[in-house]
């Protein structure tokens, strides 16, 4: 059964076990909050995009990727609050009475220990726990490698190209998706035709470089950057070469799951050394993806 995505004002009345949060990235800390709940209550856009746009973070996941990750965790329903100026002025008690009790019929509520809600973020975990209408579970921070897992930590790891660190915090590879657009056809001329994505400005972009990845399930070598060997005015692109794949992907949606960074983006003196390096990159990406698949099959 696929996950149901419902705006808050359209939910059907029933008793629910609800995990509440922005859940950007759905990292291990978020997963601990979500575990055992059938419903996730989240916000779109990110509240800071409305409250303090100049401080709004680059997001880890689009709403679509978040939905699919939640479905993989067994969540039955993602209820979305359209966060806007009007909603931001609702008090914490209004949020509890209207959203949790009135709309969702919450019987159990799960939140992270640092979750705050309502106008001026005055709502606290302790306020929720004081309500007898539902049972409240407050999840402590989760640590990985001795440090708390947070969305800001994951963003920093992605931006630095540390996909292994991001994966340890997320529990799965970092994923992006977008519509395949036409580039300058340079990869095709070099023997490595790529499916190109333009980074979403709302989302964090991996640090410039070459990565081993999976693209719609196929092993792939991915370049994130500006192609410094050539004079190009296309800006930043995510160029994905799907290994042992042939076909036209223009206009289709491509989802890229980053496994490991191979190297930084480098300007080469001519085409030949670049092509030689691309062959090495593809073989290295092939090996890494095969090892990753084998480890996943073993449960590693």
Image (cartoon, rainbow, N blue to C red):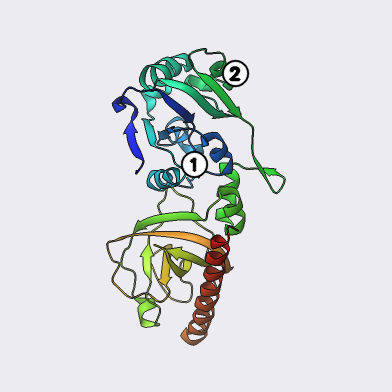
Residue 92 percent across, percent down from the top left: 48, 17
Residue 162 seen in render:
no
The count of marks equals 2
Residue 130 percent across, percent down from the top left: 56, 13
What residue occupies the far bottom of the structure in this picture?
272
Per the image, the residue denoted by label 2 is: 126
Q: Tell me which residue sits at (57%, 25%) in the image.
A: 137
Residue 288 seen in render:
yes
Q: Up-down: is 210 above or below 154?
A: below
- Res. 24 mark: 1
- Left or right placement of residue 283 versus residue 103 in this view: right
Which image quarter is the C terminus in?
bottom right
Callout 1 secondary element? loop
- Left or right placement of residue 61 versus residue 209 in this view: left
Q: Tell me which residue sits at (43%, 38%) in the image.
A: 75
Hey, which quadrant is residue 8 in on the image?
Answer: top left
- Left or right placement of residue 133 versus residue 150 in this view: left
Which image quarter is the N terminus in?
top left
Q: Tell me which residue sits at (40%, 78%) in the image.
A: 192
Within 10 Å of disc 1 (Cα), the crowding (few <14, some 14-19, many 20+) is: many
* Mark 2 and mark 1: Cα distance apart in space: 23 Å
From the viewer's side, name the closer residue of 92 and 299: 299
Mark nearer the N terminus (2 vs 1)? 1
> Which of the two marks, 2 or 1, is nearer to us in this view?
2
Q: Up-down: is 7 above or below 214?
A: above
Q: Are marks 2 and 1 in contact (CB under 8 Å)?
A: no
Residue 212 percent across, percent down from the top left: 52, 67
Hey, which quadrant is residue 297 in on the image?
Answer: bottom right
- Left or right placement of residue 141 versus residue 72 in this view: right
Callout 2 secondary element? helix
- Res. 56 mark: none
């Amino acid at each position: 059964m696929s996950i149901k995505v419902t705006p808050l004002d359209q939910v059907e009345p029933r008793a629910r076990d609800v995990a509440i949060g922005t859940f950007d990235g759905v990292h291990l800390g978020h997963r601990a909050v979500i575990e055992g709940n059938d419903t996730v209550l989240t916000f779109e856009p990110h509240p800071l995009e409305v409250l303090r746009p100049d401080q709004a973070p680059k997001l880890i996941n689009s709403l679509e990727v978040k939905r699919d990750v939640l479905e993989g965790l067994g969540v039955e329903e993602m209820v979305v609050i359209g966060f806007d100026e009007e909603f931001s002025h609702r008090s914490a008690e209004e949020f509890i009475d209207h959203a949790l009790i009135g709309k969702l019929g919450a019987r159990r509520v799960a939140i992270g220990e640092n979750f705050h809600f309502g106008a001026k973020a005055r709502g606290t975990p302790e306020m929720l726990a004081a309500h007898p209408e539902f049972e409240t579970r407050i999840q402590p921070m989760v640590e990985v490698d001795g440090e708390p897992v947070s969305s800001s930590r994951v963003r920093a790891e992605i931006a630095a190209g540390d996909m292994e660190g991001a994966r340890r915090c997320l529990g799965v590879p970092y994923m992006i998706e977008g519509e395949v657009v036409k580039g300058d056809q340079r990869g095709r001329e070099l023997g490595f035709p790529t499916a190109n994505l333009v980074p979403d400005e709302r989302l964090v972009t991996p640090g410039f470089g070459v990565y081993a990845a999976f693209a719609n399930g196929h092993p792939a070598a991915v370049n994130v950057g500006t192609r410094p060997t050539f004079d190009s005015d296309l800006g930043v692109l995510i160029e994905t070469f799907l290994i042992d794949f042939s076909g036209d992907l223009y206009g289709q949606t491509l989802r890229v799951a980053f496994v490991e960074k191979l190297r930084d983006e480098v300007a080469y003196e001519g085409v030949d050394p670049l092509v030689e390096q691309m062959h090495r990159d593809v073989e290295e990406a092939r090996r890494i993806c095969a090892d990753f698949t084998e480890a996943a099959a073993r449960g590693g």
